[in-house]
Amino acid sequence: MTAEMRARIRAGDTDAFGELFDEHAEAVRRHAVWSEGSPAHAEDVVSLTFLEAWRIRESLRPDGESLRPWLLGIATNVLRNRWRTARRHREALRRLPAGDPVPDFADEVVGRMHDADQVAAAMVALRTLRRADREVFLLCVWSQLDYVAAAEALGVPVGTVRSRLARARARLRARTHQELGRTRIFPVEQGEYR
């Protein structure tokens, strides 16, 4: 690298700095990859190295050969600063009091998905019940009326409410299981499929 190029870089000539980047960015990146072990982090190191080189460009010696040693020295300092910052961060985290463990919500989510499947299947099955059975079921189970109140609401004897509710529950259970059997598309517990 000529003294003229060094002078242009020291003076803040962006074209000269662009040439510097084009010529040496790959060498800085390789150095960072070998030091960091991560190509993603290496890109950050390259950016920070050239940003720092731009910031301290006036400290560049006016004489000398290649600028690669100067840039790799800056990259080494950038890496040291990253390591030091990471170490301080880890130490700060260790000093923090231990928090309550965060529960794993995966089982709850799977449970909710299973519950949603069951509700959907029950809704399909409920629509297949006879109207009289469905009415008794809705009044007694979902509206939580007792037998006497449901019988009064429907104008039928209490015994009729009991027999319709028993029939509705049995049919609903069977049809819900049938509906769930039709929608088994992904593995759940122990090789079972939904």
Image: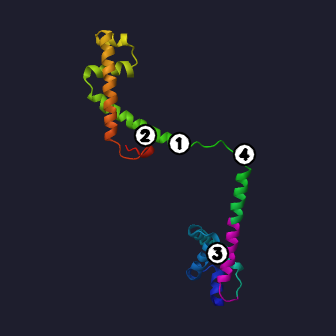
Q: Which quarter of the rendered picture does the N terminus lie within? A: bottom right
Foreground mark, 3 or 1, reads 1
Range drawn in magenta: 63-82
The amino acid type, in three-letter code, at marker 1 is Phe
Judged left or right of residue 53, residue 172 is left
Q: Amino acid at mark 2?
A: Met
- Is 149 located above or below residue 175 in the figure? above
Q: Position of residue 138 (x, y in %)?
A: 34, 22
Tell me the distance, in whole angstroms, between the alpha carbons under discs 3 and 4.
41 Å
Give the label, 2 or 3, closer to the camera: 2
Residue that label 2 marks = 113
* Quarter location, residue 100: top right
What residue sits 39% from the left and 13% below the top? 146
Q: Is the Cβ of the residue at disc 2 closer than 8 Å to that at disc 1?
A: no
Per the image, the residue denoted by label 1 is 105
Label 1: which secondary element: loop
- Looking at marks 2 and 3 on the same chain, the residue that comes earlier in the sequence is marked by 3
Q: Is residue 43 above or below residue 114?
A: below
Residue contact between numbered discs 1 and 4, judged by CB atoms under 8 Å: no
Q: Indicate the position of residue 3 as horizontal and vertical percent values.
A: 66, 90
Give the residue at mark 4: 97
Where is residue 190 shown, x and y percent of the image?
44, 44
Quarter of the image that includes the C terminus: top left
- Quarter-wise, where is residue 26 in the image? bottom right
Q: Amino acid at mark 4?
A: Pro
The answer to whether marks 3 and 4 mark residues whose Cβ atoms lie closer than 8 Å is: no
Whether residue 17 is visible to the viewer of this picture, yes or no, is: no
Label 1: few (<14), some or many (≥20) within 10 Å?
few
Distance of mark 2 from mark 1, alpha carbons? 12 Å
Q: Residue at x 33, y 19 (%)?
A: 165
Cα separation between marks 1 and 4 = 23 Å
Identify the residue position indicated by label 3 in the image.
54
